[in-house]
Image (cartoon, rainbow, N blue to C red):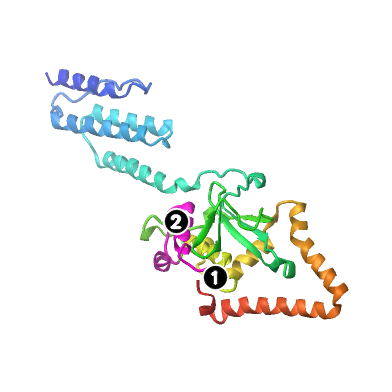
């Protein structure tokens, strides 16, 4: 009688796995003096089997190997008619795998960089500023891009532009490595050494989530070229990433990073960046003479001194 019930319940459970081609397990054998498994065990076994199958079908990231593992594990439960601690641990591992797969979805492969469409996935981009870059070509406008290549830049008070780089096409770019970012799902999940400090500053679980949080923050700030500018916005994003394990990014670091490690888009970008400065320099020398060079050098020195002193000596001057 009990043997008939066992076969009937196995046939019902096989109804839920039509897509798996592995043959059903052979009939379980037991010792003549061993007591048959109770109906409660079979009910719980069937529930666990159905739950594992639905979980594997729901998360598309599971491979066929994982699905077959779940099926074979469930069928082994059915054949034994009882559970062991290792079986319950395996079911817990399946649940744990499903949760971590959702957390790490931000590391999907990125599309290629496409300057013609202005798409720079996970990049810092730079372009020269009108007038200012004509006198100091190392100064420019900086933006940061989402994972799909959309450009974000802080160019005015209470405004962060989306997919509309303010001062024209990008001239230089630098793609950042997302593996050097810290995206903790909780306080215990920090990969950086600044656990509590990073949490107080503001964390994110994906690259785009961090950019969205920084955008909301700078939508309520006043733009100023000398105190709170586009470099400040990018530095804020890098601190939210805890990029490279550091939370001390500032506008000087951003400028040095892209100027010394950035890549030119093409030769036209080089001409776009240095031709105005060359023309102004030549005209100044012809019309004014050597005093123009002294004035230009003094302007550059004062500008650099302001940002260096404000960043490293009087930090309150450039707080944004």
Does residue 179 appear left or right of residue 261 in this picture?
left
Instruction: Report the magenta stretch's main SS.
Output: helix
CA–CA distance in space, label 2 to label 1: 26 Å
Element type at mark 2: loop
Q: In which quarter of the image is residue 168?
A: bottom right
Residue 266 at x, y = what percent? Answer: 74, 51
Magenta segment: 194-223
- Nearer the viewer's eye, disc 2 or disc 1? 1
Residue 259 at x, y = what percent? Answer: 68, 63
- Give the residue pinned by disc 1: 228
Does residue 119 appear left or right of residue 245 in this picture?
right
Q: Are marks 2 and 1 in contact (CB under 8 Å)?
A: no
- Give the residue pinned by disc 2: 183
Give the mark, 2 or 1, whose residue is nearer the N terminus. Answer: 2
Residue 37: which numbered mark, if any? Answer: none
Q: Quadrant of the N terminus?
A: top left
Residue closest to the eye, 24 or 116? 116
Report the residue at 34% width, 20% height from top.
Answer: 23
């Amino acid at each position: 009688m009990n043997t008939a019930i066992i076969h009937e319940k196995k046939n019902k459970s096989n109804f839920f796995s039509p897509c798996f081609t592995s043959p059903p397990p052979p009939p379980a054998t037991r010792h003549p003096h061993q007591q048959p498994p109770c109906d409660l065990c079979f009910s719980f076994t069937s529930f666990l089997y159905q739950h594992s199958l639905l979980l594997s079908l729901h998360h598309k990231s599971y491979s066929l190997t994982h699905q077959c593992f779940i099926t074979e594990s469930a069928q082994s439960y059915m054949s034994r008619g009882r559970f062991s601690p290792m079986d319950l641990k395996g079911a817990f591992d399946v649940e744990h795998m499903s949760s971590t797969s959702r957390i790490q979805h931000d590391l999907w492969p990125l599309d290629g960089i496409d300057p013609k469409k202005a798409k720079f996935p996970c990049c810092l981009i730079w372009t020269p500023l009108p007038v200012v870059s004509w006198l100091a070509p190392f100064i420019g406008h900086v933006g940061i891009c989402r994972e799909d290549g959309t450009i974000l830049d802080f160019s005015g008070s209470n405004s962060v532009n989306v997919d509309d780089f303010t001062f024209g096409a990008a001239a230089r770019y630098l793609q950042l490595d997302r593996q050097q970012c810290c995206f903790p799902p909780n306080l215990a999940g920090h990969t950086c050494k600044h656990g509590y400090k990073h949490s107080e500053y503001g964390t994110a679980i994906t690259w785009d989530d961090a950019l969205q949080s920084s955008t909301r923050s700078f939508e309520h700030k006043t733009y100023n070229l000398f105190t709170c500018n586009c470099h400040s916005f990018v530095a804020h994003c890098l601190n939210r990433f805890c990029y490279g394990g550091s939370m001390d990014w500032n506008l000087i670091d951003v400028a040095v990073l892209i100027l010394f490690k950035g890549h030119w888009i093409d030769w036209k970008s080089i001409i776009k960046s240095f031709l105005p400065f060359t023309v102004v320099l030549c005209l100044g020398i012809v019309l004014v003479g050597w005093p123009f060079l002294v004035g230009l050098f003094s302007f550059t020195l004062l500008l650099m001194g302001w940002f260096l002193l404000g960043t490293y000596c009087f930090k309150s001057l450039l707080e944004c």
